[in-house]
Amino acid sequence: MTTQEVRLCGLLLQEHFGDVVEKVGTHLIRSGVLNLRALAHETKLALDLVKKSLCVLVQHGMCTFGAGRRGPAGPVEYRISCERIIHMLRYPRYIYTAKSLYGDTGELIVEEILQRGQMTMSSTVKTVADRLTHNMPEGQSMDYSEVVSAFSQLVETHFLQRCPPVASAGPSNSEAVDPPPPAVAPSEPENHPDCYRVPYINLTGKGKRRRSSEDGEADLRAAKKAKTDNNECGDEGIFWQVNFERFHLHFRDQAIINAVSCKLDQTSSEIVRTMLRMSEVTTPANAAFTQALSANEIFRALPSNYNIARPILDQYLTLLVDDPMEFVGKTGDSGGGMFVVNLHRALANLARATLESVVQERFGSRSARIFRLLLRKRHLEQKQVEDFAMIPAKEAKDMLYTLLSENLVQLQEIPKTPDHAPSRTFYLYTVNQLPTARLLLQHCYKTVGNLIERRLYETKENKRLLEKSQRIEAILASLQATGAETTQLTEVEEMITAPERQQLESLRHHINKLDSSENQVDETMFLLESYITSTQASR
């Protein structure tokens, strides 16, 4: 675990859960595995606070527990997942993907489960129906059956999955955090036979509209009736969580489709999209290739609005197979030809394009030309680099040494004699794509950490102004709900002066830019992580 990863995880935990959870989580990351007493002693926090912090981390799937080094008779030990914490950066992408695929209902379902870590189907349906009803015009309401349908679709496409059962769990939260031995950590969700089976729930009715004056009472009533509601619906004890792996496969497929569209054309990308869609459930997560598909199957599965004749499809498939990017490969001739999407090769090409882009933006087009040349030729002497890149010797030497100092280029010595005399040694420049991708990934972690720190600093510096703006917006919303006159609304709006309004606009603009930058860097992080994982799996 690198320093930049630990720093980024700490910032994410602090932003989402507060200082106490951040302290417990960061200490667990640095220590590896600890039991409850040792964790409380080393963090110098109250035992109750440590228990609650672990409850939060376990609830969100960021912490696992199991029998310790002393075996089943010893204390339960806790381990935290740094990778799972970094997934919090992608929460907006998960929610947006659910919205684009399943509309507002799917968006709210994923949002609610992400916010709470895990939920039963019945409580999710009720919460989402109430939220949708609250935003509908007066007299309209969202039927529970529509939310159940969207929830079922998310499960069928594996975007949601059941939480794996815990072998030993106590009746209360405090016992669940430190269960009595023998304790067994939850298994992988995919190993559970009912992972994607939607239970029957006895739930009929429509969402309820909450009145602003009744919000406090409604929350109290909801808290009191939570247990009885679950018992009535018949899905008590069955909790659901977001399947991050499935979302990541969707992001990977979209990146491949966009790359094909940019390199070739829209029709080629639609053919690749069809191939990926046909094999998305049958292909394992870390597979180097999709399942082989015949040209006949691809032709029948193409969208009806794409009027592609069979000969034209054969030409496009030949074009994709012959393309140097090698996104599509041919594995046989039966059924008009058997084709696969080369997932590992596609990720390697996307990672390579990312590395080239970074070098070009940081060091200029000539350095990028040298970098591409080394990627293509593998090993070159300095004189060969000068000749092939058509760059003057002095400039090429400076650029190579700059790239070498940044660890983007490596120098390999091949001696002619055992004494390693410089006059009898070949010095070859090369680029190792995998270590370079790892290096760039660490730079991305550092960049995202800096962006989060800057955003928190800007928010803290303008805290008073933001609170004032929120109070005025709340007053305006209350007045509009009661049908206040325009003069009253104008008077309230004028409580913010022109300079303050200008400062607010500038702050929101900066915050939006920082948020947008975080999302863009996270896209680069995702590509590099996918490439590194794929390379390790293929070895």
Image (tube, rainbow, N blue to C red):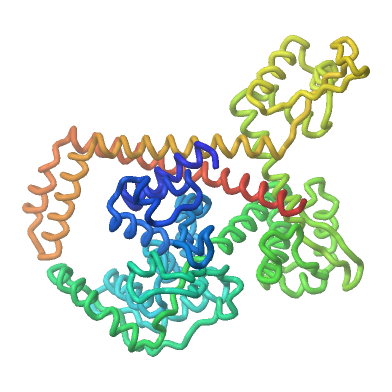
The quadrant in which residue 474 appears is: bottom left
Q: Residue at x 54, y 81 (%)?
A: 197
User: Looking at the image, is 228 positioned above or below residue 174?
Assistant: below
In the image, taking residue 485 as reference, residue 453 lies left or right, namely right
Q: Residue at x 81, y 34 (%)?
A: 376
Q: Position of residue 490 (x, y in %)?
A: 11, 49
Q: Residue at x 42, y 45 (%)?
A: 26
User: Looking at the image, is 296 positioned above or below residue 538?
Assistant: below
Q: Position of residue 7 (x, y in %)?
A: 45, 39
Q: Position of residue 166 (x, y in %)?
A: 48, 73
Of residues 125 and 508, the one nearer the viewer is 125
Of residues 126 and 185, the one nearer the viewer is 185
For the N terminus, the image quarter is top right
User: Looking at the image, is 472 positioned above or below residue 51?
Assistant: above
In the image, taking residue 138 as reference, residue 428 lies left or right, namely right
User: Looking at the image, is 244 positioned above or below residue 235?
Assistant: above
The quadrant in which residue 141 appears is: bottom left
Q: Position of residue 512 (x, y in %)?
A: 38, 42
Q: Residue at x 44, y 79 (%)?
A: 238
